[in-house]
Image: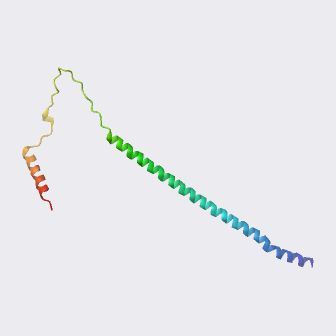
Amino acid sequence: MRAFILIAALCAASPAAAQIYSGLAVQQEAGRIADAQAARSRDITITNDLSTLQSRVQSNQALSDVAALRASPTVPTVPLGPYTPPPKMDTGKLASIPDATLAQSNANVRAAAANRR
């Protein structure tokens, strides 16, 4: 009789013991979901920060490019005395284009400009 009561008590206690484990499983699953959501939130925050930094770098680069274009280069000057003659240039070293070639090029450009469709 005692064995029967013991077996009946164990059978009645089984569902109660299973509820503890199912609650633990639900709690663990909720913890995993919360961790996944926190990781996703961190990923989104990192992506937003990276995008902001990238935009800032591009803006700074564009501003420095504009500043570089705005600055005019300094041309070195040679100080000449009041009685110093101007420097002489050898014009033979300069490029020369024959007059006939220039006239033909000019005629080609005018013909192309006049040929509007």
Residue drawn at (24%, 24%), measured in percent from left and top?
79
Q: Which residue is drawn at 15% across and 39% down?
A: 95
Left or right? Give the position of 93 relative to 59. Answer: left
Count the marks: how many?
A: 0
Task: Quadrant for the C terminus, please.
Answer: bottom left
Picture layout, residue 25 above or below residue 38:
below
Who's the residue at 14% across and 32% down the image? Answer: 90
Q: Which of 17 and 83 is in front in this view?
A: 83
Q: Report whether 66 appears left or right of 100.
A: right
Which corner quadrant of the image does residue 17 belong to?
A: bottom right
> Residue 80 in the image: x percent, y percent?
21, 23
Instruction: Determine which quarter of the picture holds residue 18.
Output: bottom right
Image spot of residue 37 (x, y percent): 60, 61
Q: What x and y, as percent, mark residue 42?
A: 57, 56
Image height check: is 11 above or below 98? below
Q: Extreme right residue here?
A: 1
Left or right of residue 70, residue 90 in this image: left
